[in-house]
Amino acid sequence: MMNWLRTNKYAAALLTLVRLYVGYEWLIAGWHKITGAKAFDATGFLKNAIAKPVLETGTTDAVYPNFVAFLKHFALPNVKLFNVLVPWGELLVGLGLILGCLTTAAVFFGLLMNLMYMLAGTVSTNPWLFALGVIVIAAGANAGKFGVDYAVLPYLHKWFDKAWERLFHKPKGGLTH
């Protein structure tokens, strides 16, 4: 199944549809935050995620104490940074997925944002987008086959191979003793 997902042209076509859907969802989420009537502010969201880190079942135990500590001691004090990173991150993830440009990087950051939202207690479409994102990232480069990645990835491979040779004075993959 993984081989089919990573190499088959029909899988690439199916992945393009998945990629377009997930990308559209991210693009719209970011666009609304950037162009909204009020400037995006994550302060309320962060304070709520810190104040109510409990399970829906009624227990008062913090579900993710390390994540709550991250929100309390890093995210909230740096909320101005997050007010920029969140909407632009969502928009750029959406563009990357729609265009099929740096697809695996875009979906990785989308998965990371989905995970953060879910850890903060937001469900919404995040589990669905997370599941579809896992399929896209598992497909690797085949997910961007019908996109800009078709042209960009060969160029990036050549560039990284040359950089590797310059840094280590040996071809990538070739170990010398």
Image: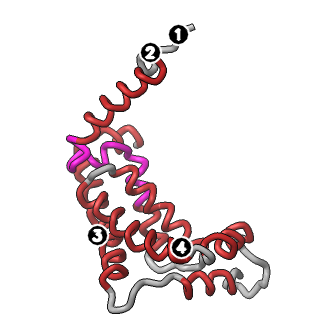
Q: Is residue 67 left or right of residue 7?
A: right
Badge nearest the viewer, 1 or 3: 1
Q: Which residues are magenta?
A: 133-151
Marks 3 & 2, CB-CB < 8 Å contact: no
**Distance from the alpha carbon under mark 2 to that under mark 4:** 43 Å
Dividing the picture into quadrants, the one containing residue 177 is: top right
**Distance from the alpha carbon under mark 2 to that under mark 1:** 8 Å
User: Which residue is label 1 attached to?
Assistant: 176
Q: Earlier in the sequence, mark 4 or mark 3?
A: 3
**Distance from the alpha carbon under mark 3 to that under mark 2:** 42 Å
- Secondary structure of the residue carrying numbered label 4: helix
User: Which residue is label 4 attached to?
Assistant: 117
Residue in the foreground of this view, choosing between 36 and 115: 36
Q: Earlier in the sequence, mark 3 or mark 2?
A: 3
Marks 1 & 3, CB-CB < 8 Å contact: no
Residue in the foreground of this view, choosing between 74 and 20: 74
**Distance from the alpha carbon under mark 4 to that under mark 3:** 18 Å
Q: Is residue 36 above or below residue 129?
A: below
Q: Earlier in the sequence, mark 4 or mark 1?
A: 4
Which mark identifies residue 60? none
User: Which residue is label 2 attached to?
Assistant: 170
Report the amino acid beneath label 3. Tyr
Marks 2 & 1, CB-CB < 8 Å contact: yes
User: Which residue is label 3 attached to?
Assistant: 24
Magenta stretch: helix, strand or loop mostly: helix
Marks 4 & 3, CB-CB < 8 Å contact: no
- Secondary structure of the residue carrying numbered label 2: loop
Residue 95 coordinates in the image, percent (x, y)? 28, 62
Marks 4 & 1, CB-CB < 8 Å contact: no
Quarter holding the N terminus is: top left
Residue at screen point 45% across, 69% down: 85
